[in-house]
């Protein structure tokens, strides 16, 4: 990758730790892609993790685009496939309570897509990173259409996480349903 991912993410994370809402991206001419969103949310880590872990399921109160729903094929475990619109991915790693990592499984968009959560005095640092590459027609489409839409969706997800859970969202009851 022609982008110094570690240095960029470290700098952007420092902005988030100062309380800034961070939405940054580098899409290099060779297709290298780094997209980062972060925010400290004044809600408990466990609650936020549970809500992110339920995205794509029937009891999702986070996904912001009802006309283009995120759909997961099953419970949050490695190997489960998910999609929203034409974007396809597979869950590759879960660290219960702190990390959910997906891998893109579609043509022209490669790499990983990850949520990490860290407990802070002021709440929870929620970070979302795409670290990958676009190829073919996506090199032109990402900066003009897909990237801005992704940014909009991620900022709405973070907005929804800042709000209290939906009144029907009770992880204890959800475990019983599954």
Image (cartoon, rainbow, N blue to C red):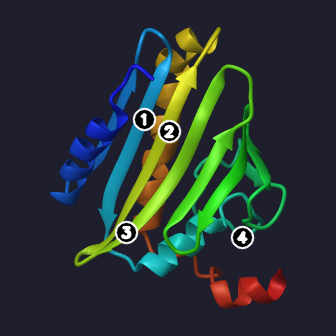
Q: Which residue is mark 2?
A: 130
Q: Residue sitting at 57 percent across and 64 percent down?
A: 52
Tag 1–tag 3 contact (CB < 8 Å): no
Indicate whether 35 appears above or below 14: above
Tag 4–tag 2 contact (CB < 8 Å): no
Circle 4 packing at 10 Å, graded few (<14), some (14-19), many (20+), is some
Q: Is residue 146 visible?
A: no
Where's residue 117, x and y in %?
Answer: 43, 65
* Helix, strand or loop status at disc 3: strand
Most foreground residue, 76 or 22: 76
Circle 1 packing at 10 Å, graded few (<14), some (14-19), many (20+), is many
Q: Nearer the viewer, mark 4 or mark 3?
A: 3
Locate the C terminus and report the quarter of the image it occupies.
bottom right
Most foreground residue, 63 or 14: 14
Q: Which residue is mark 4?
A: 59
Tag 2–tag 1 contact (CB < 8 Å): yes
């Amino acid at each position: 990758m022609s982008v110094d991912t570690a240095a960029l993410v470290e700098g952007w994370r420092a902005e988030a730790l100062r309380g800034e809402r961070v939405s940054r991206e580098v899409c290099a001419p060779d297709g290298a892609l780094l997209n980062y969103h972060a925010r400290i949310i004044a809600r408990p880590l466990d609650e936020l993790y549970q809500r992110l872990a339920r995205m794509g399921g029937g009891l999702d109160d986070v996904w912001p685009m009802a006309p283009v729903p995120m759909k997961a094929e099953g419970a949050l475990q490695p190997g489960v496939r998910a999609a929203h619109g034409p974007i396809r991915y597979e869950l590759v790693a879960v660290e219960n309570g702190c990390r959910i990592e997906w891998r893109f499984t579609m043509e022209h968009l490669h790499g990983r897509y990850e949520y990490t959560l860290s407990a802070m005095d002021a709440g929870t640092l929620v970070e979302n990173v795409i670290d990958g590459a676009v190829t073919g027609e996506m090199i032109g489409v990402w900066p003009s259409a897909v990237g801005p839409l992704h940014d909009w969706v991620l900022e709405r997800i973070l907005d929804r996480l800042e709000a209290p859970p939906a009144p029907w969202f009770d992880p204890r009851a959800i475990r019983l349903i599954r």
